[in-house]
Amino acid sequence: MTEVIARKGYHGPSNEAAIEAIHNELDALWDDASFVPDMDRMTFATAVIEAAANIVQHALPVAEKPVEIDVDISVRPTRLVARVSAFNAREPFANDMQASMPDEDAESGRGLALIEALVTTVTFERQDGTNTWILTRDT
Amino acid sequence: MQFSYEVKDSYAEVKSVGRLNMVAAPKLREVVNEVVAGGSSRVVVNLAETDFMDSSGLGALIGCLKATRQAGGDLRISGVQPQVKMVLELTNMDRVLTAYPSAEEAFGDD
């Protein structure tokens, strides 16, 4: 296992308050890992918030239980890793997974393309009603 | 996130303070729509105190740009910080949303 130098997380209902809370966790993470360069903080935090916002805006519950969001972010010696999960969520529609930039007058649809431009790897997993985005950025 | 605006002689300045994310994006649209409805279609969004913008915030700016142009005006941005500049460049929207150093300069040429 790669050594984890700093770690933060959040778990709660999938709503707007979660987005602000995840922003605050990211800020706290950089306080604990002040050696991470500004450029890496900026790009990684943007990707994490995009993934979380995608869940809050698009994830639909699989049954009666509402969708919950879970974020686990860690700093390792040469890599930043985030697992951004939607619990109790349906599988995303294929057209929600569009990763190319839309026309310039489009007012939405840039999130996934932006995530891909910001991080080194993007992996999607689905298991037992949970969708997980794993984002990594080599530092 | 906070928005405030001030109507000046030849344009209106909308000041955006805080994170321009999916929570704040609808509020920006509301404020700019109010400014345009009030008769100011030349709008500068001052981003000097906005240290974070995501694709929802960008989408709101594009919506506001369209609203001002439909009213015969334009929307420009000023005081762009590094993270916002990065998002504009990675999405190729820096060509559409022209950034000026200050709100005063945004409509200074016309």
Image (cartoon, rainbow, N blue to C red):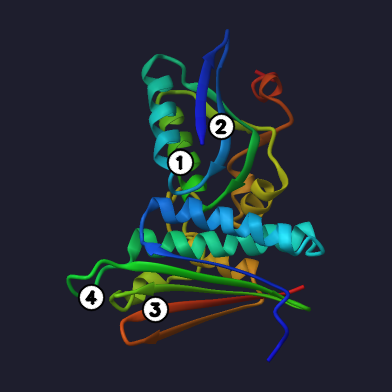
Q: For numbered disc 3, what is the local secondary structure?
A: strand
Q: For numbered disc 4, what is the local secondary structure?
A: loop
Q: Is residue A137 left or right of residue A126?
A: right
Q: Mark 2 or mark 1: which comes first in sequence?
A: 2
Mark 1, residue position: B24
Q: Which circle, 2 or 4, is nearer the viewer?
A: 4
Q: Which chain hosts label 1? A: B
Kindly indicate the quadrant of the structure image that contains residue B31. Answer: top left
Q: What residue is shown at x 34% (from left), y 63% (from top)? A: A58
Q: Is residue A88 left or right of residue A32?
A: left
Q: Is the residue under label 1 in contact with that under label 2 (CB below 8 Å)?
A: yes
Q: Residues within 10 Å of mark 1 (few under 14, many from 20)?
A: many
Task: Give residue B10's position: percent from left, percent from top.
Answer: 57, 12
Q: What residue is shown at x 58% (from left), y 33% (from top)? A: B17
Q: Amino acid at mark 2?
A: Ser
As drawn, the label of residue A131 is 3
Q: Mark 4 or mark 3: which comes first in sequence?
A: 4
How far apart are labels 2 and 1 at the CA level? Answer: 10 Å
Q: Is residue B29 left or right of residue A77?
A: left
Q: Are marks 2 and 4 on the same chain?
A: no
Task: Give residue B68's position: percent from left, percent from top.
Answer: 45, 28
Mark 4, residue position: A62
Q: Amino acid at mark 4?
A: Val
Mark 2, residue position: B16
